[in-house]
Amino acid sequence: MARIPLDSHSAQEDASLIVQVRSGDYDSFTLLYNKYIRQLTQYGLKFTPDMGAVEDCLHDVFVWLWANRNKLNIHTSVKSYLFKSVRTTMLHWLQKQHRVQTINAGDDQSYTFELQLTPETLFLQNEQQRQIRQQIETVLLTLTAKQKEVIYLRYYEGLNFEDIAQNMNLSVKACYKLMGRAISVLRENMVCCLFLVLSFKL
Amino acid sequence: MDKYKQYQTEDFLQDENFIKWVLDPDAPGGQSWQAWMKANPDKREAAQRAVDIIRSFDFNKETIAENFYVNLKQRIDNTIEAEHRTPVRKMKIPGVWLKAACIVAGIIVIGIGYFNRRPSYTYFSTPYAAIKTVYLPDSTEVVLNANSSVRYSKSRGAREVLLSGEAFFKVRHVVMDGKTIPFNIHAGNSVIEVLGTEFNVKDLNNETAVFLKKGKVKFSIPASHTATLMQPNDYCYYNAAQQKIITRVANPDLFTAWMEHKYRFENATVKEVCETLKAYFGYDFIIRNDKLDTQTVSGTLELNNEQVMLTVLGELFKTKITKEGNKIIVE
């Protein structure tokens, strides 16, 4: 899998980087940039394919981070905080672009989150996994932007539900609920698929 | 771990502990899940299904050139630097001591500036496949082609611009105390000296090319003591290998079409076309047929729609073109 490994040292490293940044250490700021800019760029591109807009937003996020380093008040993981900053800036940009009245956290329809499975199929060793993949592909089309975003942040980026809830202005409970709904859509499709597999075996 | 005995696939999918294990099986505590799966064969199928689902959530990544991140960081550095700077005020200093104090302070400030190594200039850049119009502090208009950058600074009464990639300049004529302020562009080994004029500069693969639309510019290579004074519609290029400036009269459309998101080619070799597109999109072109390299083509390519562009390119080259990730393969 071409994912970013989640090692337990990473969070501690980030926390100490932020302490350094707060004390005005520009090198730590650069380290933080180099560590997360690739993931943040991919995340930003889920909101819009406009590379220039994503570049501008990332620029603003990091400039803001440095300018307000003394006032940083981070209650989630640093990674999650950066994701939230990108999210807020991207949604703000979308709002200006499309003159959307309000991009409300509770409103699913106000933005898009373009999510597709990777074309790489290296890990698909057996037929069952291939079927699951196909199912997920169809299910992704029916999910709302928010459901897709929760899936992306939870299972791909590895942020925990508490952090995701904070990022998306949801209660933790609502976040679980959203996840549950997305999963039940998945399951309905999976059950059909399971039936097929079983009937073949018989 | 008794509660897990009641778990269905969707319960596993929402369990922090379980997800952590699937995403990072080697982390401490991972073994206990492996043991649990073995000890509870009746739950194994449900859990395995959850594992498969989570592993399937591997999403498509856009390919982005490393250059993008470097340029973006530079842009961030410049903005932060610019926000730090405060305008310098002129003061009348009465005493010699005050002057001395100012000099000492000045040295300290320069020292800090030197060690921080954040230069004071204006910087603009573009990622791959994007064209941007920017204005320098002297209100000169610059249209930047993809994956290009300009750095502007003012020193000793001249405007100095460092260019990488390709850009079209509409230089503003600035007069101060009855003297025209020079505008110099440094690209590769070349220096282009300007008064007030419109022209295109391209610096690619050790070759600097200038096309002059209006006005007058001097194109020079200080290192090899060569220079030429360009007239409108002149196209000059310097090749580092040949150490020579070559001049010919050219069709303006060929050099300015990119500003309308098009590339126009007239009797260009396939190799030249591929190099131009590589500079714009950042893709590597692999030409499978050696004979194609030197074949010449003429035509226009629209850059906005990549799919259409590749189809037209195929027709232009009269061959099959396929895209594989970051590579374009020309059969």
Image (cartoon, grey):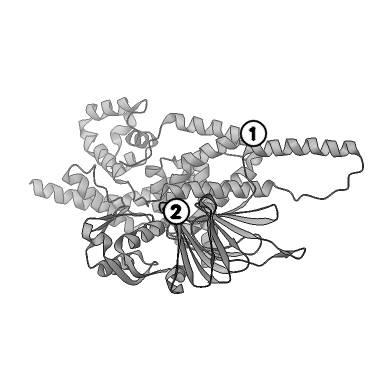
Circle 1 crowding by C-alpha within 10 Å: few under 14, some 14–19, many from 20: few
Report which quarter residue B108 is drawn in: top right
According to the picture, the residue beneath numbered tag 1 turns out to be A23
Q: CA distance from mark 1 to mark 2?
A: 51 Å
Mark 1 and mark 2 on one chain: no
**Left-right relation of A53 to B20:** right
Work out whether B130 lies above or below B83: below
Q: Quadrant of the N terminus of chain B?
A: top left
Report which quarter residue A158 is drawn in: top left
Q: Nearer the viewer, mark 1 or mark 2?
A: 2
> At 24% from the left edge and 38% from the top edge, which residue is drawn?
B48
Residue B103, x across and y down, in percent: 80, 38
Outermost residue, front direction?
B225
The chain under label 2 reads B
The residue nearer to you, when weighing B134 against B171, is B171
Residue A202, x across and y down, in percent: 7, 46
Residue A171 shows in the view:
no
Which amino acid, by three-letter code, is at mark 2? Gln
Residue B184, x across and y down, in percent: 60, 58
Circle 2 crowding by C-alpha within 10 Å: few under 14, some 14–19, many from 20: few
Mark sitting on residue B146: none
According to the picture, the residue beneath numbered tag 2 turns out to be B243
Indicate the secondary structure of the residue bearing disc 1.
loop
Residue A152 shows in the view:
yes
> At 46% from the left edge and 50% from the top edge, which residue is drawn?
B68
Q: Quadrant of the C terminus of chain B?
A: bottom left
